[in-house]
Image (cartoon, coloured by chain):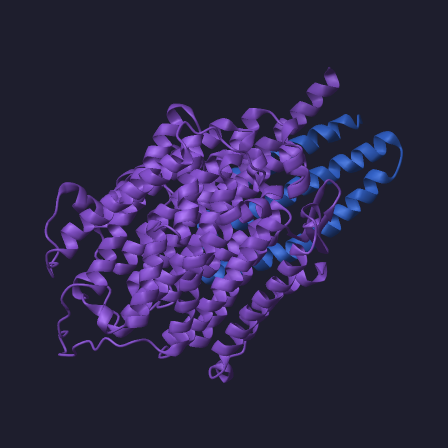
Amino acid sequence: MNPVNYLYLSALLFTIGATGVLIRRNAIVVFMCVELMLNACNLAFVTFSRMHGNLDGQVIAFFTMVVAAAEVVVGLAIIVSLFRSRHSASVDDASLMKL
Amino acid sequence: MENLIALLVAAPLLGAVVLLCGGRRLDAVGHWIGTLLSSASFVIGVVLFTDLLGKNAEHRTLMQHLWTWVPVEGFQADVTFRLDQLSMTFVLLITGVGSLIHLYSVGYMEHDERRRRFFGYLNLFLAAMLILVLADNYLLLYVGWEGVGLASYLLIGFWQHKPSAATAAKKAFLVNRVGDMGLSIAIMLMFTTFGTFAFGPVLSHVGDASEGKLTGIALMLLLAACGKSAQVPLQSWLGDAMEGPTPVSALIHAATMVTAGVYLIVRSGAIFNAAPDAQLVVTVVGAVTLLFGAIVGCAKDDIKKALAGSTMSQIGYMVLAAGLGPIGYVFAIMHLVTHGFFKAGLFLGAGSVMHGMNDEVDMRKYGGLRKYMPVTFITFGLGYLAIIGFPGLSGFFSKDKIIEAAFAKGGTEGWILGGAALLGAAITAFYMTRVMLMTFFGEKRWQPDENGHEPHPHESPRTMTIPMIVLAFGSVFAGGIFGIGDRFLHWLEPVTGHEEGNSPVSALTVTLATMVVLVIGVAIAWAQYGRRPVPAVAPRGSLLTRAARRDLLQDDFNHVVLVRGGEHLTRSLVYVDHTLVDGVVNGTAASMGGLSGRLRKLQNGYARSYAVSMFGGAAILVAATLLMRAV
């Protein structure tokens, strides 16, 4: 199978993720969309690794997974405490910092 | 011998430091310390004088280099004292008359609890004045010049609890600042022209500079002289300076301060000689002031203010003589010295009268005092005869010479200046006779004051009468000692130079004319104030009299032209500041504010809108990168 198809899939997933980030209000969905974008990148890295025949892309994919795992821990904690204080998980409600 | 020169200055300076820093424990002896140290300075002066007399005329300049003040390449300022015939004359006058005034103040200020401080200031005054006349360069002279200004401020405002005295002190100081500015500009001009400001190099290289520059320097020096010597247009402080204690008036008017301007002009004679236009201005200033002061002196009922007008007028004579160039320098200084004697004597006499009359200064409330104060009457009378130029007394020799020199200027100018000087002599005779008659003759006119205290005129204590007697001797004999055989001329000629003018009228004619105007002046005063009783309240008087009582409207003039003018200038500057400068600043600030107000809208607080801008930015960056690749 032509590896370029994987790149197309990666671009499709990234776009879906980005769109989700922009149009969804629920913080958890936005968060999941961010994860989707990260994994789309991982797919692209692994594909390029395969196409060029070296392991750099795969190494970076591991790094991304570690960072994503850490991010999930912090992000979910924030979302949970946000929900506790406001009884809402909408990202638009958390707009206290605006002037 | 040179090493003694610094001691001249050091003695009174030490006195000032000790008395002003010594505190109350010196209250009991402070006045004697001050008097002793100023007398010590006089004794040193006499020693140096005898030393100079023993030398040939060309070796009579002693220099003492103390230290280099500013040792910079191309800018050398030394603290060097120069004692020559001119400064020697001043030293003797300052320390001699100054010491007598110290002695007098011991009695006069007896009941003042701040007497120690007063003597500290007096010593400071002498020290500053001595630095002024002994300096060998204009920069050091400036130090003394400012010191004199400071000391006069402290002394005029000595009774600072009186608002009028505090104001008078400020006025004297401020008016003097105008003159000081002239001196500092003159020094700067001198430095750019000659590269130095030491007397020797500057005065011997006058020929190298252009006449325009020299005229500029000379006019600035004249402005300085006008400030210190109370010449028109900077004369207004002198009358108000009478708010100070009377010994201060005597010191300012006779031995220090007002003589500084004349000294400056005579010392810078070489510059003035090379700038005839400036000389003409000097003579005009002198002639105007001598009439101005004389007219003011005629109208004042305050005995000290009448004498102040007289000082202004007499200094006018000196400035006039100094403006005549080498014909007049010697006579300017000679009149200065004789004036120092009789004016100090007159002021001390006036102080003695006030001392006996509960500090009353209005002459209309005196009258008939000759019976009560015989010593004051005789010494004051001798001073009076000297100032009007009674034949044989001091004023006769010195003033007559100035009138002759004015005529000898030649041409129309000579006639005008000589005529002004003669007219001044007549007015002098008038106002001094008026002072004399109103104070010592006629019926007694004093009344009990509001508390019922009637003044009991009495003769002053010994410490006050002795200086008056000594000064009276000076008023009588100084002129003869100087004038007969031209002794003073030969003494001073090596420093100032001298030329005989070609007078269109003979010396004898001038003398006779002076005598005639003198008699006329005295006769008019006698007719007005001697023959009939003096009214206790001043009559309304003519327009001129009323103007003269207001010092010929000098303060009104200053108010309208300078104060109002200054206010308008300030207002217009404030307007420009508010509209133009503030407009630009505020406009910039307002446009910045408006811009940021619009930028602020971007911060709407919605995370998703930030995400849009982030994605947009990233997309633009990627697009730009690809585009650059393609190109």
Is residue B563 in view?
no
Residue extending furthest toward the top: B631
Quadrant where the N terminus of chain A is found in the figure: top right
Horizontal and vertical percent for residue B390? 34, 51
**Residue placed most toward the observer, B595 or A64:** B595
Is residue A31 in view?
yes
**Residue placed most toward the observer, B509 or A82:** B509
- Total labels: the figure holds 0
Q: Residue at coordinates 34% horizontally, 42% vertically from top-left?
A: B290
Chain B representation colour: purple
Horizontal and vertical percent for residue B9? 60, 62
The vertical placement of A61 against B436, above or below, is above
Image side of residue B237 versus residue B448, left or right: right
Image side of residue B47 versus residue B331, left or right: right
Q: Residue at coordinates 24% horizontally, 64% vertically from top-left?
A: B361
Horizontal and vertical percent for residue A28? 55, 50
**Residue B616: quarter of image:** top right
**Residue B401: quarter of image:** top left
The vertical placement of B99 against B339, above or below, is below
Residue extending furthest toward the right: A53
The vertical placement of B138 against B442, above or below, is above
Horizontal and vertical percent for residue B32? 50, 78
Image side of residue B207 versus residue B529, left or right: right
Image side of residue B503 versus residue B291, left or right: right
Chain A representation colour: blue
